[in-house]
Image (spheres, grey):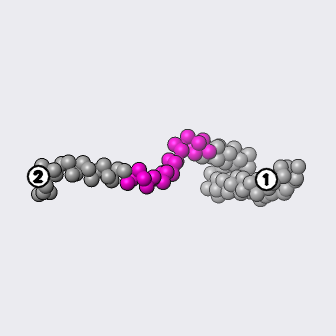
Amino acid sequence: MKQIEVQIMGQSYLLGCPEGGEAQLREAVDRVDAAMCKIRDAGKVKARDRIAVLASLNLAFDLVQREAAPPPAPPAAPSDPTADDARAVQLVQRLDQALAGDGHLL
C-alpha cells in the first residue's frame, strides 16, 4: 500500500492509499479540507475536533441526499423509422376514412 502525505486545514497527515487510488484519495482530501476550512472561516467553531465532526456530518448528509434523490431518467431510445412510417400510414388511413364521405377538410 502506498503512503501519501496530505494537508488538511494546515496539518500534515500520512495516509495509506491503495494502488491506483491516489487521485480519488486526493479528491476526498480536498473535499474534507474545503469543508473544514469553510466551518473554521465562519468563525463560530474553533476546536479542530469539532470542526472535523461538523464537516464529516455535512459531507455525509450531502451523500445521503444524493443517494435518496431519484435516479435520472434513462435516455430515450432512438425511434424505429419503420415504426414511425407505419404510424404515419395509419394516421393517413384514418384521415382518409374520416374524409371519405365529404372529401373536404372545411
Horizontal and vertical percent for residue 20?
A: 81, 54
Q: Residue at x 64, y 56 (%)?
A: 38
Residue 71 magenta-drawn? yes
Q: Nearer the viewer, mark 2 or mark 1?
A: 2
Compared across the picture, whether 105 is left or right of 43 comes to: left
Residue that badge 1 annotates = 21
SS at mark 1 in the image? loop
Where residue 24 sits, quadrant-wise, is bottom right
Is 47 on the left-hand or right-hand side of 63? right
The amino acid at mark 1 is: Gly
Give the side of residue 14 with respect to residue 34, left or right.
right
Q: Residues within 10 Å of mark 2 (few under 14, many from 20)?
A: few
Residue 45 x/y as whole percent: 66, 50
Q: Nearer the viewer, residue 86 or 37?
A: 86
Would residue 81 be found to the left or right of residue 90 on screen?
right
> Of the residues shown, which amino acid type is indicated by label 2?
Asp
Q: Which residues are magenta?
A: 63-85
The residue where tag 2 is placed is 102
Residue 63 x %, y %: 62, 45
State the quadrant of the C terminus: bottom left
Instruction: Examine the rendering and report whether any part of residue 72 can be seen.
Output: yes
Q: Is residue 71 above or below residue 7?
A: above
Frontmost residue, 4 versus 96:
96
- Residue, x 55% and y 40% (percent of image)? 68
Disc on res. 3: none
Q: Residue at x 84, y 57 (%)?
A: 5
The CA distance from mark 2 to mark 1 is: 74 Å
Upstream in the sequence, badge 2 or badge 1? Answer: 1
Q: Do the residues bearing badges 2 and 1 touch, measured as CB atoms within 8 Å?
A: no
Q: Tell me where residue 79 appears, x and y as whole percent.
A: 45, 53
